Image (spheres, rainbow, N blue to C red):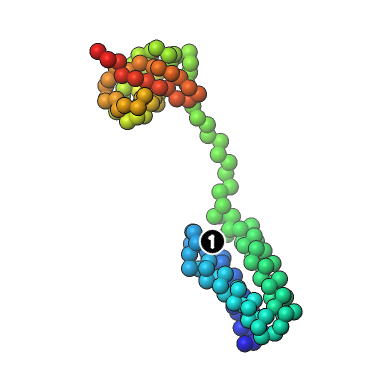
């Protein structure tokens, strides 16, 4: 096998790896095929041209593959695939002046086990103690954690 065939195996293996990282998510036939072609190129270089050529081919593969992937994701096309924005959202905290333990209200929707409730004119997300609470049921605040209200139905 000629040196041209080894170079073609390396190039095809690199292209398949690039397809694996950029186009097809997960471990697919493209990634496995890319690694097999790169391994085959190194094997052929060792078998046909000896130890020195094999180690040179192995070094080229070990340098070219990560470098190609790194520069692809730094290119304009690669940057379109990467999230560039910072997430600046935050969880709403419960106003502990308006809602306190022991307050009563009504469920707006079914709590299974979480849902919307209206307490002191405020519509908030609440969690039941484990049982389902039907729509329009009177509830009582049992506990207020960082951003969670625990409620129970009021037994009549």
Q: Is residue 49 left or right of residue 23?
A: right
Quadrant hosting residue 142: top left
Residue sitting farthest toward the right:
52
Which of the two residues, 124 or 51, is positioned nearer the viewer here? 51
x and y percent of residue 84 in the render?
58, 47
Which of the two residues, 10 or 40, is positioned nearer the viewer here? 40
x and y percent of residue 78 in the render?
58, 58
Q: Residue at x 31, y 26 (%)?
A: 131
Q: Is residue 45 above or below residue 147?
A: below
Q: Is residue 143 above or below residue 30?
A: above
Q: Residue at x 60, y 79 (%)?
A: 8
Please count the marks in the image: 1
Q: Residues within 10 Å of mark 1 (few under 14, many from 20)?
A: some
Secondary structure type for disc 1? helix
- Residue 106 visible? The answer is no
Q: Is residue 20 above or below residue 49?
A: above
x and y percent of residue 32 in the render?
52, 68
Q: Is residue 122 above or below residue 56?
A: above
Quadrant hosting residue 40: bottom right
- In the picture, the quarter occupied by the C terminus is top left
Q: Residue at x 44, y 13 (%)?
A: 100
- In the picture, the quarter occupied by the N terminus is bottom right
Q: Residue at x 55, y 70 (%)?
A: 34
The residue indicated by pointer 1 is 22
């Amino acid at each position: 096998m000629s040196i041209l065939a080894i170079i073609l195996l390396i190039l095809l293996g690199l292209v398949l790896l690039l397809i694996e990282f950029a186009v097809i998510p997960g471990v697919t036939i493209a990634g496995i095929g890319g690694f097999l072609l790169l391994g085959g190129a190194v094997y052929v270089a060792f078998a046909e041209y000896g130890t020195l050529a094999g180690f040179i081919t192995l070094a080229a593969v070990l340098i070219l593959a990560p470098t190609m992937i790194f520069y692809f994701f730094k290119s304009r096309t690669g940057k379109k695939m990467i999230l560039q924005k910072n997430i600046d959202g935050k969880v709403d905290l419960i106003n502990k002046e308006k809602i306190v333990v022991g307050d009563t209200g009504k469920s707006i929707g079914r709590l299974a086990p979480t849902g919307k409730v209206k307490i002191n004119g405020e519509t908030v997300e609440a969690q039941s103690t484990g049982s389902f609470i039907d729509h329009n049921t009177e509830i009582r605040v049992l506990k207020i954690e960082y951003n969670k209200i625990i409620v129970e139905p009021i037994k009549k």
